[in-house]
Amino acid sequence: MRYKVCGKQYRNDKCLVCGFDNPLSLGMDFWQLENGELAAYCICREYHQSYPGRTHGGVISALLDEVIGRAICITEPTCWGVTVELNVKFKQPVPLEEKLLIVGRITRNRSRMFEGSGEIYDGNGNVLATASGNYMKLPADKIVHTDDPEGPVNAMNWRLVDETPAPEYIELPY
């Protein structure tokens, strides 16, 4: 099904998943969808591999953790998801050098915690990995302690990166 892109999320300069100034980063942009889900595309490279031609399980876990943990920002933009528990199921090998779709959502939202789920899809819509997790909600100043007068978000170099124009729609395989 096709969903309209409603917004783009901020990125950090050094993050493994979204870093815009990290040569080993996956460099992902995250797109907020009209159905309340978060989607991202990525291509895992040779330096993200475990067995030849396959993405490392830790990288797969990081992709799913990031898309689920960020999904809370759609409805609570000043809130950050900090992982408490993540359960990943590896269904098929995740290939290198192929475009992947990663989708996450909130499945239960409480005052201080939330639960979410996510999937990684290949270009044919096959599910390669799934995850579910529990996250604590925290504001940035509880995560990053800084003397920066502009606050923790500035200290983390957290900003919109305009390298990738927003797609109008994202096609989800369900």
Image (tube, rainbow, N blue to C red):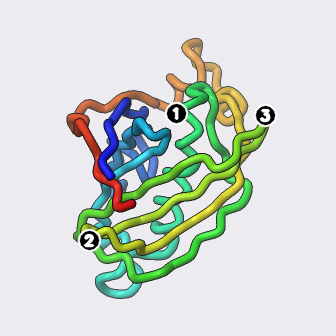
Decide if residue 79 is on the left or right side of residue 165: right
Where residue 31 is drawn, which disc sits there? Answer: none
Q: Going 39% across and 60% down the picture, which residue do you hit?
A: 174
The 10 Å Cα crowd at callout 2, few under 14, some 14 to 19, many 20 or more, is few
Q: Residue furthest top?
A: 149
Residue position marked by numbered label 3 in the rendering: 111
Residue position marked by numbered label 1 in the rendering: 74
Q: Position of residue 7 (x, y in %)?
A: 37, 30
The secondary structure type at the circle numbered 2 is loop
Label 2 to label 1: alpha-carbon separation = 27 Å
Q: Is residue 149 above or below residue 127?
A: above
Q: Residue furthest bottom?
A: 51
Tag 3: residue type? Answer: Ser
Dot 3 or dot 2, earlier in sequence:
3
Dot 2 or dot 1, earlier in sequence:
1
Q: Nearer the viewer, residue 85 or 27?
A: 85
The quarter of the picture where residue 95 lies is bottom left
Tag 1: residue type? Answer: Ile
Q: Position of residue 110 (x, y in %)?
A: 76, 39
Q: Position of residue 24 (x, y in %)?
A: 34, 58
